[in-house]
Structure formats: structure tokens, C-alpha cells
Image: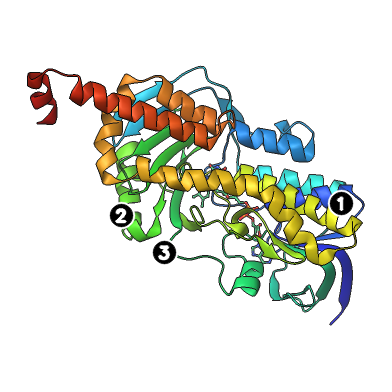
Amino acid sequence: MRQKTFDVIVVGGGPAGASAAYTLAGHGMGVCLVDKAVFPRDKLCGGLLTERSRKAFDTVFNTSWQPAVEGFSRGMRFYYRDRLLNEVKDYTNLTWTRRTLFDAHLVDLAKSNGACMRQGVAVKAVEPESCTVTLADGIRIEADYLIGADGVNSIVAQSLFGRAFDKKTIAFGLEIEAPLGGRLQDITDPEIYFGVVKWGYGWVFPKQETLTIGVAGLWRKNRDIKNAFRRFVRHRCHGMPQAKIKGQYIPFGDYRRVPGRGNILLCGDAAGVVEPITGEGIAYAMQSGYLAARAIIESAARRQPAAACRYYAAGYASIAGSLRWANALRYLIFPKWSEPLFVSLLPKTKSVPRKHLDLMAADLDYNEYAQFLIRKTGGFLFDSVIRRSPGQRRRALK
Ligand SMILES: Cc1cc2nc3c(=O)[nH]c(=O)nc-3n(C[C@H](O)[C@H](O)[C@H](O)COP(=O)(O)OP(=O)(O)OC[C@H]3O[C@@H](n4cnc5c(N)ncnc54)[C@H](O)[C@@H]3O)c2cc1C
């Protein structure tokens, strides 16, 4: 078994790993980026990139993301089952991509910045004490630091904490790529569907040659999610398109409070940094990959490898803070009792969907959004129940 030595091993070449490898290599560190897949590779994903993602991409790569994206929309439609509740037009860009295209571009950027890549070979074992990984072809790689950016089933997270995630707290998502044509030809803005799964939502996202149709919801509340998905697709597409259904866990709501240990850091889905209301993960993957790399650069400069996780925790706190607020907000948005409230409120408001998009663009903090929603729903309840005449109130409550 040959042994190779690097400054840093990054396991996983998705947005988290590519961002980390790009940043580290740009600082002259010897990086080995390992991925079990050969790029371009597919990844189950809606491929919707918010302005938060664009800002994260700019921070990490400081170049145009044009070669990595397919198109954009300037609006979004919100439905409850088949009822259109609200539509936002002329908003800032919501960009879409195919992950085959996006992730391959990020990996190319990391390689051209000096990262060495081993692809098509999985990491089969991790020895955290010696910071060594063993690949499926028997080669062992040793480094001063290890970054686990290997997605939701992270072998690096398992080596540190015994398991990658807790099934009771995370979500499951299903998708198909439906070919464009017939009644599906004219969909150019993303569509969001509430009421099709519990504690989650359905979506239809446009692409150049397909529509990505999916649902995701908390696994423990949606054991029958495959049937819910089939019902949703049949209804939206007026039949079941010829396309393979694919599914995967999404770690939303289950972020790591401590994202690693000593010189081993977790980022992206491996750290569970997925926003639990929208399911957005690409922005947080790039942000956390970048922050993990910066922490390693700082700890290497101070010759304190074991302090890397402590340095990382300082930057990671801003992501964890947003996810903490988002986790709490779910208890206002998703429970059964709040469904009728939002179904009545959404058609009557311009500000709620716009503020939601402001949040996705990182123009609004989660705590500001929470305060806004509490004010708005409280005011709406006051208007529709308390300020009405006794007759109106009786009718409204029927
Ligand atoms: C159905 C669905 C829809 C989604 N839609 C959106 C969306 O529209 N917008 C959005 O922002 N987010 C979305 N997400 C979330 C988003 O896909 C993830 O948060 C994001 O991909 C996380 O990036 P990552 O780099 O952490 O992990 P990944 O992109 O999963 O990359 C992990 C990499 O690690 C590699 N790997 C894994 N194990 C090993 C191993 N043992 N050895 C070597 N390599 C390994 C894999 O091959 C992979 O390339 C969606 C997720 C799902 C499931």
C-alpha cells in the first residue's frame, strides 16, 4: 500500500469540498481532493441558486458564475395544492443550474488553482487519530488536516461521531427530471407547492431541457412520501412522465453544533448545514467549505493544527445562528394549525412572499424575518377575527 502525504485531504468534490480545495490551494497548501465519482457527475438537487448562493460563490471564487449556470427567472409562484395563492414578478434573479454542470465547473476551478484531484475512487476508511484515509484502490493518504465534505452519508462524520445523521430529525427528498413538452412547455418561473407533503413542500423548477419536479419533507412525518410524490407529479403533469424517480436524505434541521474535532472539519451536507424551510444547501455548502479552509490556513500559520476546529467554530457560528432561527420558524410555518392561516393570508399580501425571497437572497436576517412573520400573522389574525363585527366573526369562524 503506497502512502502519500499532503497538507490537507478534502473528501468530496461537491460545492463544499470544491470551495474548500480552491481556497486552500490558492494559499499554497498541498491539497488532495478525493471523490468517488468521476466529474461531471450528477447529484440529486432542484438546482435552484438563490442570490445567497451567488454571494457565496463570489466570496469564494471571485469570478463570474456564468459558465456554471443555465438560466434565470425573475419571479416565483406559490400554491396550496392546486390553488395559486400568490405570485411574485420582477424580483431579483433566481438562477437555475444542473448540478452536473455546476459541480464540474467548481471542481475545475479548484484544480486550476492547484488542487490535486483523485476521482472515481471512494474513501473506504478514515483514521481520525492519524488523519489518514484509505482509498478503495488501497492507497493511503496522510495529511495534517482532513475536511469531510462528503455529503449526507459522510464517512468522515461517521468516523468522528459514529453516525452521519439521525433519521428522526432529517428530511427525505424525491425528484424526477420531466422532459419539456405539451402543457409543461411554458413554465419559466419556479413554482412552490405547500400542502403536498407534511413539514416540507413540493417544487417545479425550470431547466433548459427539463423540469425538475420534487418534494421534500421531514422523514418521520412522511413515511408515505413516495405515494405523495406520485400524486403530486400526476396532478401537475396530467399523468406520470417517463422519468426515473430518485430519492435522497436531506439533512435539514440536523446541523452539527460542533462541526468537527481538532484538525478534522466537516462542511456542507456532512455538517448538516441545509436550511430547513427552503431546503437550500448549496450556498451553505460553499460558505462552510470556505470557512473550514480559512480556519485551516489560520491554524497552520499559528502552527496549531489541533485548534483548527476552534477557529472554524467562530465563523461557523453565523451559519449555525441562521439555521437555529430557521429551525424555530418551522414551528410557525409547517404545523397543521398554521396551514389555514397561511392559505388565507398569502393571497392577500404582497409583502410575505417578497420578504421570503429577500431572505433567500440573504438581504434579510432570519431573526428579522421571524419578527416580520409574527407581526404579520398576528395582525392578520387580529383583523380577520377580533376587529370584525360579531356577525362577520361568526361567519369567519364557521
Ligand atoms: C432532492 C433535493 C433537492 C435539492 N434542491 C436544492 C436546491 O434547489 N438548491 C439548493 O441550494 N440546495 C438543494 N438541495 C441541497 C443540496 O443538494 C446540498 O445541500 C448540496 O449538494 C450539499 O453540497 P455538499 O458539497 O456538501 O455535498 P454533495 O453535493 O452531496 O457532494 C458530496 C460529494 O462527496 C462524494 N463522496 C461521498 N462519499 C464519498 C466517499 N466515501 N469517498 C469519496 N467521495 C465521496 C460524492 O460523490 C459527492 O460528489 C437539494 C437536495 C436534495 C436531496
Q: Is residue 41 above or below residue 62?
A: below
Residue 271 location (% of width, % of height):
61, 58
Instruction: Indicate which disc, 2 or 3, sits on the residue closer to the N terminus.
Output: 3
| Residue 118 visible, this angle | no
Q: Quadrant of residue 60?
A: top right
Distance between the alpha carbons at the discs numbered 3 and 1:
38 Å
* Residue found at x 87% / y 77%: 3
Which residue does the image show at 34% across and 32% down from the upper left?
Answer: 79
Neighbour tally class for label 3: few under 14, some 14-19, many 20 plus, Cα within 10 Å: few
Residue type (three-letter) at the residue carrying disc 3: Lys
Three-letter amino acid code of the residue under disc 2: Asn
The amino acid type of the residue labelled 1 equals Ala
Q: Residue furthest bottom?
A: 1
**What's the mark number on residue 168?**
3
How far is disc 1 from disc 2 in space, using C-alphas?
46 Å
Of the two numbered discs 3 and 1 in the rendering, the one whose residue sits closer to the viewer: 3
What residue is rendered at 33% in x and 37% in y?
A: 236
User: Considering only vertical position in the picture, is 32 above or below 357?
Assistant: below
Q: Position of residue 285 (x, y in %)?
A: 64, 48
Q: Is mark 1 within 8 Å of ligand 1?
A: no
Earlier in the chain: of badge 1 and badge 2, it is: 1
Q: Which mark is residue 227?
A: 2
